[in-house]
Amino acid sequence: GAGVSQSPSNKVTEKGKDVELRCDPISGHTALYWYRQSLGQGLEFLIYFQGNSAPDKSGLPSDRFSAERTGGSVSTLTIQRTQQEDSAVYLCASGDDSFEAFFGQGTRLTVV
Amino acid sequence: GDSVTQMEGPVTLSEEAFLTINCTYTATGYPSLFWYVQYPGEGLQLLLKATKADDKGSNKGFEATYRKETTSFHLEKGSVQVSDSAVYFCALDHQAGTALIFGKGTTLSVSS
């Protein structure tokens, strides 16, 4: 069956450029999460969408980061004016009422 | 705020050894508790969960018991295999409408 799909799987960008990362959640899941995984830092929460509620943006590290979820389905994480410290694996997950989160394979972002 | 603390790794064991990975949490109320696993080259996946005090989650020979009195959810396995080598993440989810909070992860390496 279809799981959480993220694209691209790898992205190399120049410092200062904007990037968009896409997440296609599992159909019917109301919850969608974005996390960032850096070496030795575990999973850093970024943003959380639940149904039609206002998203929890408390984990976004700066105003260069934003995310939207269109039609309660696909989500895009945008990073403006990328910096080298933004290099990480960006993980998306979706979830249902059981609180279990299903993760995608992630997008590895490298800022050079 | 809510947080999860798990033992730092790496944990290196021989095959058939006993495994314990400690996890403690800080949260108000009664969160649900999870262990996620990330095998090399794969995405995170749920290993087991417990939703209330004294519940025991189990899967693939792994077990963890929700201990409210010690705010702990330690992961155990009686006899590890080489195929258990992975990164293990403890997490909590306070309630619907909040994001999963993860620990930093513990790397387990099992040798034959």
Image (cartoon, coloured by chain):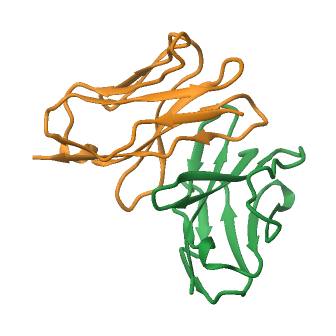
Chain colours: A green, B orange
| Residue at x 89% of width, y 46% of height | A52
- Where does the image place residue A74, in percent across and percent down from the top left? 75, 62
- Where does the image place residue A24, in percent across and percent down from the top left? 67, 62
Quadrant assignment for the C terminus of chain A: bottom right
The quarter of the displayed image where residue B80 is located:
top left
Examine the rendered structure and indicate whether residue A72 appears above or below residue B50. Answer: below
- Specify whether A97 is left or right of B12: right
Taking the view exactly as shown, the residue that stands out farthest to the bottom is A14
Viewer-nearest residue: B84 or A41 = A41
| Residue at x 60% of width, y 32% of height | B92
- Specify whether A18 is left or right of A87: right
* Count of numbered circles in the view: 0
- Where does the image place residue B9, in percent across and percent down from the top left? 34, 45
| Residue at x 61% of width, y 25% of height | B32
- Where does the image place residue A59, in percent across and percent down from the top left? 73, 52
Taking the view exactly as shown, the residue that stands out farthest to the left is B112
Examine the rendered structure and indicate whether residue A54 appears above or below residue A37. Answer: above
- Specify whether B1 is left or right of A6: right
| Residue at x 9% of width, y 46% of height | B112
Examine the rendered structure and indicate whether residue B65 appears above or below residue A55. Answer: above
